[in-house]
Amino acid sequence: MTNHHDHDIFDRGLAADLETFYDRRRALKLLGAVGLAAGGAVAAIAAGGAGAASAAVEACVGKVPSETAGPYPADGSNGPDILTQSGIVRSDIRSSFGPFSGVATGVPLRYEITLLDAATCAPLSGAALYIWQCDKDGAYTLYSAGKLNQNYLRGVQVADRTGTLAFQAIFPGCYSGRWPHAHFEVYDTLTQATASATPRRTSQLAMPAAICETVFSTTAYATSLSNYRRISLSSDMVFRDGYSRQMPTVTGDVTTGYTAKITVSV
């Protein structure tokens, strides 16, 4: 007896046959690219389809480079420890919290960061990320002169089931000798982050040159402009060896603000 379902499959014509063939070939390439991490890709397919899996595999080809936390982390490794303080877990990091009341002004910048496990390509649901950066003038709270009694532009968020988290900040300024950037530490759990445990990965984000030029040309960032004109990605101590996995895609405008999106594999 002819199975009508089988008949439908084989009677859709050459175009459908070719579509099926290429779909299968793409699937095989996907699994081959993942290798031992195929389980993560399969999970991504189940959660969001082949397109989501393909994007995940492409994004987690290599880990984000490990970089210095620098002299102003406030994670207990060099002076103050903000991670153990109530209020550090927040999405809007423009204002100070606790005993402080200052607010960082500048061009709005929203970070949207997706965390992936580099070994499996799976979203790091439940992982925590601590981000910190300088203000529009290139100063760091808790360290720089005049900012010792402020703690804005520092915060922790937990990744959702897709590995994504977000922060509302301002576009970072530029200080002498460094390309405009933001620092971050990734922890396996929020408990580890707020206990100042050893992070899973410490790295930095590099701001795109075209956006920097636009932002620093505004009056509010006048202090940063001269510093920016004396530095380049090729001369920066952190990014001169490469930044392809550390530069977010930034959209928006200087009037309404920007959004910086990046997928980070750790």
Image (tube, rainbow, N blue to C red):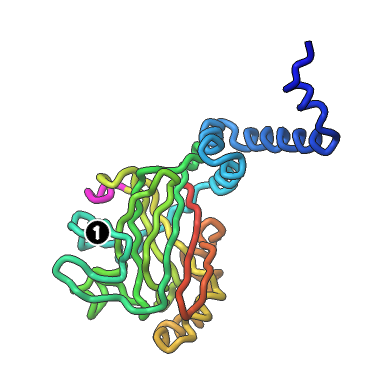
How many marks are shown on the rendered structure?
A: 1
Residue 51 in sight: yes
In this orientation, which residue lies closer to the viewer: 57 or 173?
57
Residue placed under numbered mark 1 in the picture: 88
Q: Is residue 31 magenta?
A: no
Residue 66 versus residue 4: which sits nearer the camera?
4
**Quarter where residue 243 is shown:** bottom right
Residue 142 visible within the image? no
Task: Tell me if 264 is positioned left or right of 148 in this view.
Answer: right
Q: Residue furthest left?
A: 99
Q: Quadrant of the N terminus?
A: top right
Query: Which residue type does callout 1 highlight?
Result: Ile
* Residue 155 on image: x %, y %: 30, 60
Q: Is residue 194 magenta?
A: yes
Left or right for 30, reference 225: right
Instruction: Look at the picture and state if 220 lies above or below 126.
Output: below
Q: Residues within 10 Å of mark 1 (few under 14, many from 20)?
A: many
Q: Residue at x 19, y 74 (%)?
A: 101
Report the front residue among 239 and 155. Answer: 155
The kind of secondary structure element at disc 1 is loop
On the image, the x and y values in percent for residue 119 come to 49, 38
User: Which residue is farthest right?
Assistant: 14
- Outermost residue, top direction? 1
Task: Name the residue: 38% across, 58% down.
Answer: 184
**Residue drawn at x 58%, y 40% as measured from the top left:** 49
Q: Position of residue 185 (x, y in %)?
A: 36, 54
Q: Quadrant of residue 188?
A: top left
Residue under the image location 41 percent in, 43 percent down: 161
Give, as a single range, the part of the protein colored magenta.
193-198
| Magenta segment, prevailing SS (helix, strand or loop) | loop
The answer to whether residue 199 is left or right of residue 97 is right
- Asked whether, in this view, residue 89 is left or right of residue 110, the answer is left
